[in-house]
Image (cartoon, rainbow, N blue to C red):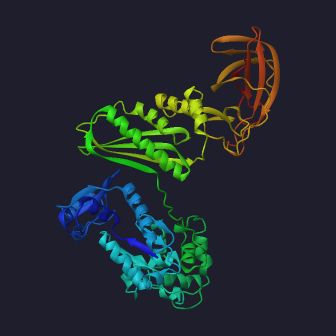
């Protein structure tokens, strides 16, 4: 079943304004706009604005020429998408799973469930009644495939189709033949190409596929002609043949179901607003205790906590924490939040607090007495990392980890201190590497006996170093799967000067490799 919200953005705006269709601010011409490089553009227009000539995609300056009295409000595509996700979850009342059909639709699997509502027509009536009660202008249709249901929901009423239900026993191709090719969910440029080819209806495209022209005679072009024209189109929305096969059920169409995820949340509504820090700490401690019990019941631990504080004047203050490891220790939560609440301005008072675990991970039962003893003596690594992160910042505490690369500057990376190492990353076996690598290799001037010979003397940071000992070369080839073809190989040398200082230098390229001029020399590391 496909549910199409014809005016999703406007219906959401009306809900936020508390008005019905054609009432209040919606009675006058109104449009939702978005800023572009060429000026404001209309994303949605209400019936009064459309009657005056405004349309979606029109520049606001052109719309004001037709309707000077039009009012505008900013559009919110991200908010509309979040609303559509909530709508998809709510639509699971009609089927076991649902999927978003961005930007303004929902697909629901109603296989073998229509009898629970008294049949498919009563199911569609229930959809219409419930959506209308919520202020949503929708059109729904039921078909054997998602593409056919989408086409009926969007275009069936425009061509006088009998109802919005397509039975598996019907000839799907004949039933949908009068629908426009836009019912295939194609990109605008593809629709323009089909229009220029004279293919305006699904029946025209089906006739070409079967090797007949529109008069019924054999046509040598057939499906291969369309396939050759769109063979470079990888996206289904850019290939009419793929969309036609999905609509008729010849090939499957993958859909991504919306999975409801409920974040653990606890809150306190206070009988009297609070303004003092001592009372605030008491309420936060109670919330931490409630959150610990909630997480324990789910067998999880919190990695990210969000504390919301609602003031009497309506302002909402949010403080967020991200822990190094999953935890449900209430005392640890309170200690971390204590440093984040120093700058709280309670105003005329805080009347509600809400604690939400935005990110949680499975966490089994542990021996809390041992962990508490370790934390009491300052030996709990997770607690230490959380305190450092709270004081220094989220990205200030990291640890190096090996990466699967033989290029020295790519052989290690950084990640949060207690994150497990990726399973596919393995440290490769190298020759002796210096303890210190420069952030970027620094270019040096080298004196050598021959282009392919050992270095004899080099200049680095204004100092000339005489080479006493040399070991090498160690040849490192470029990573051909990510580098350009002109990238040169490296010959690394471990050298020691007359003062006993040891360096790691390399020659970038060979004089005879045909990938540039004479090779350059770089210093990349220092040995202890």
Q: Can residue 373 be seen in this snapshot?
A: yes
Instruction: Report the number of discs.
Output: 0
Outermost residue toward the bottom in this view: 216
Q: Quadrant of residue 74?
A: bottom left
In the rendered image, the quadrant that contains the C terminus is top right
In the rendering, at what x and y percent does residue 174 appear? 50, 88
Q: Is residue 201 visible?
A: no
| Image height of 486 relative to 506, above or below | below
Q: Give the residue at x 29% y 33%.
A: 276
Residue nearest the viewer, comparing 427 with 355: 355
In the image, what residue occupies the spot 54% across and 73% down? 243
Q: Nearer the viewer, residue 500 or 398?
A: 398
Q: Residue furthest front?
A: 369
Q: Nearer the viewer, residue 84 or 371?
A: 371
Residue placed most toward the observer, 241 or 104: 104
Q: Is residue 326 left or right of residue 149?
A: right
Residue lying at the far top in this picture: please name it.
Answer: 499
Rendering coords of residue 167 (x, y %)? 50, 87
Q: Is residue 65 left or right of residue 494?
A: left
Q: Position of residue 348 (x, y in %)?
A: 22, 38
Residue 493 placement (x, y as % from top left): 78, 23
Q: Is residue 493 left or right of residue 356?
A: right
Position of 74 relative to 198 (above/below): above
In the rendered image of this protein, does residue 120 appear above or below residue 32? below
Q: In the picture, residue 498 is in which quadrant?
A: top right
């Amino acid at each position: 079943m496909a549910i199409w919200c014809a005016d999703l953005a406007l219906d959401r705006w009306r809900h936020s304004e508390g008005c019905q269709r054609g009432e209040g601010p919606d009675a006058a011409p109104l449009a939702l706009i978005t800023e572009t490089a060429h000026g404001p553009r209309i994303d949605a227009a209400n019936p009064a604005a459309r009657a005056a000539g405004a349309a979606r995609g029109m520049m606001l300056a052109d719309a004001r020429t037709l309707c000077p009295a039009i009012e505008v409000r900013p559009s919110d595509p991200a908010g509309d998408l979040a609303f559509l996700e909530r709508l998809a979850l709510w639509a699971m009342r009609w089927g076991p799973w649902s999927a978003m059909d961005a930007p303004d639709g929902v697909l629901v699997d109603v296989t073998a469930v229509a009898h629970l509502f008294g049949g498919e027509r009563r199911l569609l009536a229930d959809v219409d009644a419930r959506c209308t009660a919520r202020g949503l202008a929708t059109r729904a249709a039921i078909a054997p495939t998602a593409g056919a249901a989408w086409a009926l929901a969007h275009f069936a009423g425009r061509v006088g189709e009998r109802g919005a239900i397509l039975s598996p026993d019907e000839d799907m191709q004949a039933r949908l033949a009068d629908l426009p090719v836009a019912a295939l969910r194609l990109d605008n440029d593809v629709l323009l190409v089909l229009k220029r080819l004279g293919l305006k209806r699904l029946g025209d495209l089906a006739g070409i596929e079967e090797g007949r022209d529109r008069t019924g005679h054999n046509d040598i072009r057939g499906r291969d002609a369309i396939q050759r024209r769109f063979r470079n189109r990888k996206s289904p929305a850019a290939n009419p043949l793929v969309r036609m096969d999905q609509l008729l059920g010849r090939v499957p169409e993958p859909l991504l179901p919306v999975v409801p995820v409920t974040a653990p949340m606890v809150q306190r509504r206070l009988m009297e607003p609070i303004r003092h820090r001592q009372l605030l700490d008491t309420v936060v401690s109670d919330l931490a205790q409630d959150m610990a019990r909630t997480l324990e019941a789910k067998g999880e631990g919190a990695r990210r906590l969000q504390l919301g504080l609602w003031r009497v004047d309506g302002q909402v203050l949010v403080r967020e924490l991200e822990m190094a490891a999953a935890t449900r220790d209430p005392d640890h939560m309170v200690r971390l939040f204590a440093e984040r609440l120093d700058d709280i301005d309670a105003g005329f008072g805080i009347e509600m607090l809400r604690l939400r675990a935005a990110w949680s991970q499975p966490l089994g039962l542990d021996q809390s007495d041992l962990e508490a003893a370790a934390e009491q003596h300052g030996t709990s690594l997770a607690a230490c990392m959380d305190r450092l992160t709270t004081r220094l910042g989220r990205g200030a505490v990291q640890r190096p980890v090996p990466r699967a690369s033989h290029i020295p500057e790519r052989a290690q990376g950084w990640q949060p201190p207690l994150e497990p190492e990726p399973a596919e990353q393995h440290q490769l076996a190298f020759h002796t590497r210096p303890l210190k690598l420069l952030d970027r290799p620094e270019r040096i001037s080298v004196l050598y006996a021959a282009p392919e010979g050992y270095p004899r003397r080099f200049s680095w940071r204004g100092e000339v170093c005489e080479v006493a000992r040399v070991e090498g070369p160690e040849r490192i080839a470029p990573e051909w799967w990510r580098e350009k073809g002109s990238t040169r190989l490296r010959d690394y040398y471990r050298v020691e000067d007359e003062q006993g200082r040891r360096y790691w230098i390399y020659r970038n390229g060979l004089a005879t490799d045909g990938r540039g001029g004479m090779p350059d020399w770089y210093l990349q590391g220092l040995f202890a």
